Image (cartoon, rainbow, N blue to C red):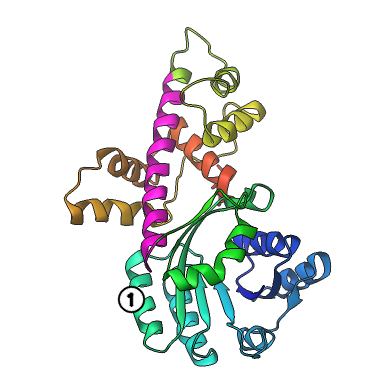
Amino acid sequence: MKLAMIGLGKMGGNMTSRLLRNGIEVVGYDRNIEVVTKLAETEGMVAACSVPDAVSKLGNNGEKRIVWLMLPSGEPTEIEIQNLAHMLSKGDIIIDGGNSNYKDSQRRGVWLAERGIGFMDAGTSGGIWGLENGYCLMVGSTPEIAKVVEPILIALAPSKENGWAHVGPVGAGHFTKMIHNGIEYGMMQAMAEGLDLLKGKTDFNLDLAQVTELWRHGSVVRSWLLDLTADALKEDQELTAVAPYVADSGEGRWTVMESVEQGVAAPVLTLALQARFRSQDATGYSYKLLSMMRNGFGGHFVKSVND
C-alpha cells in the first residue's frame, strides 16, 4: 500500500511514522520543510516539496491513488480538496482525517463523486499518544472504498481487530467523532469539578495525587483521562503554571447544535461547553485541570499564567 499524507503536524506526523513502521509507503508533504526532512531521514518517508509533487510521486500506473489530509478544518481542508480534484483521476481516493464538520464531509463527498473521485471521512482519535498506542478510527465511505483503505486503517489502529470501524456512509465518520468529542467534554468537566470539590475540603487536606492514583485501580471512574490527570498531579497539585483558560476546538459546539436540531436533550454536554466559555473570562482550579487534560491527550496549547 502507498498513500500521500498532506499535513505532518502533531497528528499527521505521528500517523505517518506509524504507517511506515507497519509497512505502508508514505509520500509526505507539509509547509514546514524541517518536519518533512526529519520524517524522511528518520522514518524513510518519501519527501515531497508540494502537494502536486506528492501526488506525482504516487505514480499513475492504474492503481488507485490515495491522499490523506490532516489539515485544520474549514477553509484549509476545503481548498485542498478542491485543488486535489484537479490533480486526481477517476477511481482515486481522498481521505479527510481532520475534525471537519460532518455536513461539510457529506457535501464534499457528493461533489467528488460527481467527478468520479472517492471520499472517506475519518474521525481520528488518539492524540499525541497514537503513534505508540494506535489510533481509534471512525470512517464513513462506500463499502468499496472502505475495503480499499482497510490495510491503512489496520496499520494505524491499535490492532487488526480493534480500534477501527467503517461506521456508515460519507459523513458518518466525522459525525461519530463529533459526538465522541462532545462526550469527552462532559467527562472532563465532571472530573474537573469533582477534584475541585475535593481540593476545597481544606479540613481533610486531601492529597489529590493520592486520590486520583487510587481511583485508577478498580474504581468505576477509571479511564485514560484519569490516568493523565493522576500523572499531572504527581508533578504539581496546584498546577501553578497553568492558566484557568480552556479553549474549545469546535466539535463540542457542533455536538450541542446537533442536539438542538434533533430536539434531543443533552444538558451535560451543553453545560460542559458553556463552562469552557466561562473559563475564558474567569478563574478557578477546575479550569486549570481541564486545560491540563487537553494538553495531556492531545498536546493542545496550554495558556500559562504569564501569557
In the displayed structure image, the side of residue 289 where residue 283 appears, left or right: left
- All told, the count of numbered labels is 1
Look at mark 1 in the image and give the residue it sits on: 107
Q: Position of residue 206 (x, y in %)?
A: 53, 13
Secondary structure at numbered mark 1 = helix
Q: What residue type is labelled 1?
A: Arg
Q: Does the magenta-highlighted stretch encompass residue 169?
A: yes
Q: Where is residue 274 in the image (x, y as percent from the top left)?
A: 31, 44
Residue that appears at 43% across and 87% down:
116
Farthest residue in the left direction? 263
Q: Magenta stretch?
A: 168-197
In the displayed structure image, the side of residue 22 where residue 128 appears, left or right: left
Q: Where is residue 40 in the image (x, y as percent from the top left)?
A: 78, 71
In the displayed structure image, the side of residue 129 where residue 252 appears, left or right: left
Residue that appears at 66% across and 89% down:
56
Residue that appears at 44% across and 50% down:
247
Is residue 70 visible in this depiction of the protein? no
Farthest residue in the right direction? 41
Q: Which of 58 and 91 is in front in this view?
A: 91
Farthest residue in the top direction? 203
